[in-house]
Image (cartoon, rainbow, N blue to C red):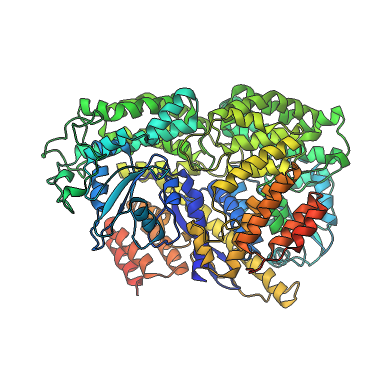
Amino acid sequence: MLRPRCGILVFSWLPTSENRIEERLPLVLNPYHLNPRVIAMRLRGLALSLALALPQALCGQTAVMRAHLDRDAGEPTTSPASLFVLDAKGTRTLFNGFTSLLQTEELRPYQVPMRGYATGSGVGRDLISKYHLSAKAQWLLIDKQSSFVVAQGEEIPDAQSFAAYLHKAGFHDLVKELRAYLKEFPTSLEAHEQLLHQLRQRGERAAQRFMGIQIETHRERLDRGDFAGFMHAEATIEKVDLAKAKALDPIQDLEAWAAFAQELETVFRSGEWREIHLPWVQDGRALDAASPTLRVLYHRWQPTVEEALQRNPASESFWDLWIWMSQAQGGRPLAPLLEALKPTPLVSDPWPPVRAVQTLFSVATTQDDWRTLESLYQTQWNTESHPLREAAPTHTTANRALQNSGQEAQTALLDQDWTTYLGPLLECCLRSGDTSQADALFIQAMDASRWMALPGKGAELAKRCHQTALAARWGALRPTDSR
Amino acid sequence: MHSLKQAPALLFALMVGWTLTAQTLVTAGDNNLSLAQVLRFHPEGMILSLPGAQGQSLGPAIEAALDQEPAVALQLSSQELILNQKVGAELQRLKGWSAEKPHWVMIGPDQRVHAEGSEAPTPALIFEAYGQSPLRTRASVLREFLKLNSDQSDALARLILATRSLAERRTELLLRPKPTTSVQELPPTRDRAGAPKEALTGSTPGETVGEPVPDSAPAATALPARLRDEQDANVWDDYAALYERFIREGHWLDLAPDGSGPISMAGQLSDSAEHSPHLIALAQKLLPTVEDHLRSRPSDEGRWQVWASLRSALGEVRPSTVLQGLRPLPGAHRWPPAAALSAFVEEAQRTGDWHQAEPVLQTSFDQNSEFLHALEAAAQEDASQRWNTAHGETNSTAGPKVEMGNYFGFGGWNGEIALLVEAKLRLGKLAEADRIVQEVYARVPKNATAESAAALARTCGATGLAEKWGRLAK
């Protein structure tokens, strides 16, 4: 029967040497076709873990990673053409100009995908060579098959001219088309999902324009080659200091967010939100706290999300949404929610889900938050196996494989344990005032792991938490038999 | 560095391993595992055994006993340890056993032993000893939990998976020919002197199902055999009630976006449904509900899998009927959606008509080829940047060319390409089939590719192509 219960394990290859592709990343793939969403999700999930464990294996693969994510973004809608902007090295004149141009009222509906490169970059040189262009700064509108240039120039065109180029390339106002589609198929979850996605993008662009700020998404970090930034951001929500931005006035707020908020309200009222993917809660720009419209909407519907979490406490998508809503409202106590949730018995998965705890950590602000998180991290620290806590080799197969792999892999494993567990646990202790517990845990890890890098990492963390004396003491520790 | 290359795979295997209802740590070759670590994943308890000094093993007999009524209802795991490893020695010390005889224990997560012996236990002995212990099966703990938290989708899904697995096993036991040698008749490894006092013998407990079918019953290969009404009710009633609730109350709609996890798995009707008239009727009853939800999200592979599981029980798939009256989302670049591919292929394989499956497979192939080219360009860009960095260049194009080889497996011969080639062959599009095979072989010139393609051509009756492709193999 052609119905796999689960995907098969297939190995993919990433280029690791100059000229030969070697086996690197395994992915779960449906044996009969490659679901891009699955690939991208698995890749993102993997990327975080592997980047922590094996940084050398993944660094320098930004273009390959972009290609994977492009494929993900290609479903289910795709643009008929892409705008490539080539700036002289060290400048972003054309790119910034087009960023403004595409935000104009006339061009906003088209959601033109734009990529910026230096003329001398690999992509820049490839484009110049492929389309026989001069090596000057310029822009190109290229059809989706990359077979021909629809339009090209060295100056930024006016909105009306550029709209004409877009029509020639086959662009449509997707929001208008999706609304028409929904009239015909009102129960289409995918149409609601796409409409929300389009409206969210428009809202983000408008809000940034009104507030005079630019926030990079994870994907945009990757586009400019910041692989580490892309990886780091996967488990966190960017903390954006909106106080430094201009406040949205009520009219701007409505102009930016009313359409998105209305559509979101519609799917919450119908209950369809549970079945809709809301990708911006992972990869959106955290602008929502500046919008009274969105804050009110989140306040109204967050209890509904909490009810859904009671029904499915392990759902990562419900957790992501709850955390996003909480952050937009300036925080919401975690402890009462945790008390109301009953995780499934006899399940060995960590509770709450690791990613939820990591994201909560990234947005924690109050003493209560830190105390609750300390308790969660302490439980994980006590119940799981940790190379930083155990001098003896640890029990997991992966850990053993890494320990057999030499110094580099062992260091990566210790570093991962620090970044994922011990570091956050110590920070929670210090921020909630439990300094003696932090000290005891740190000394225990020092004795067990004898890791040379640990004093430096501990000192840096203590300093960040304004514990100068502790930072000096931890930094001065020297393992007797170091790794 | 060989093991370093394996590490990501192992890490990944652990990452995806959470979907399992119960995990078992493989102890073989591992000298660092402790007993507590082995038992941690078995809060319901498990059976551990140690072989004797002469290598006498109870493992296979215990496995066989756990697979028989009434012990099969417990859904317990067993594992044979090795004496000269840490965990084996720990168990030996715990019980003060001599190394002469083989031993087994029924042990809880707190390392308390509830039954033990030095010869293979019978299914009845295991069942009764478990019943007298404070241990509780996963299914019974989940049922208790659901009494207090009836809306909890994850627990309901896990209970469905547990009941499904048990019912599937019982169906298999009922429909297979009666074994000539029962577990009870296996020759004892040792004398019965060491029989545990906790181990009880007695009547068969009440959880057993109807009588096995006579020896003349059809073998498992002559499917689909059907259970008799009484057997069907005994085996499948519990699962059917839970499954119906799972679908009707919409729990299955909380599918993870990547189609993983217990909720996604529980949403699919049992593969054994074709043996159960009761489940076939249930599939018929639930189909309209599932079809409505599928039509509201036709790009959702998880929904297609649930739908296909019901359709399979009914003996037909027909994915095009679901898509009738729908049209692609504005901006969508393929229709039917990629998620429907498996359903189209399954329909073609059932009916032998590949007309509808072929364009769907072709679109997937084209998209994957496009993706492969994009990856080639991306890999080249990365390699050039690394080369430039290493050589202090900024604009040089002198970097080495990247060879993609069998990237992702879909540059070479794989299941999807085999299906596309089969579709072409079945439809008589021999030239197209040849072009695809030649293209794939040029990319990954392996004998296995040529041999697989030739074998496929022979199966489809394309002897000329079979010979031509066979000659590609060196």
| Quadrant (top left, top right, bottom left, bottom right) of the C terminus of chain A | bottom right
Q: Position of residue A246 (x, y in %)?
A: 89, 38
Q: In this orientation, which residue lies closer to the viewer: B357 or A290?
A: A290
Q: Position of residue A466 (x, y in %)?
A: 82, 49
| Quadrant (top left, top right, bottom left, bottom right) of the N terminus of chain A | top left
Count of numbered tags: 0
Left or right of B66 in this view: B335: right
Instruction: Give the answer, above or below, for where A234 lies relative to B160.
Output: below
Q: Position of residue B236 (x, y in %)?
A: 30, 29
Left or right of A124 in this view: B318: left
Q: Quadrant of residue B331?
A: top right
Q: Residue at x 69, y 47 (%)?
A: A437
Q: In this orientation, which residue lies closer to the viewer: A418 or A271?
A: A418
Q: Residue at x 75, y 76 (%)?
A: B392
Q: Is residue A336 visible?
A: yes
Q: Is residue B316 visible?
A: no
Q: Quadrant of residue B163?
A: top left
Q: Residue at x 79, y 33 (%)?
A: A256
Q: Position of residue B111 (x, y in %)?
A: 40, 45
Q: In this orientation, which residue lies closer to the viewer: A289 or B156?
A: B156
| Residue at the front extreme of this rendering | B96
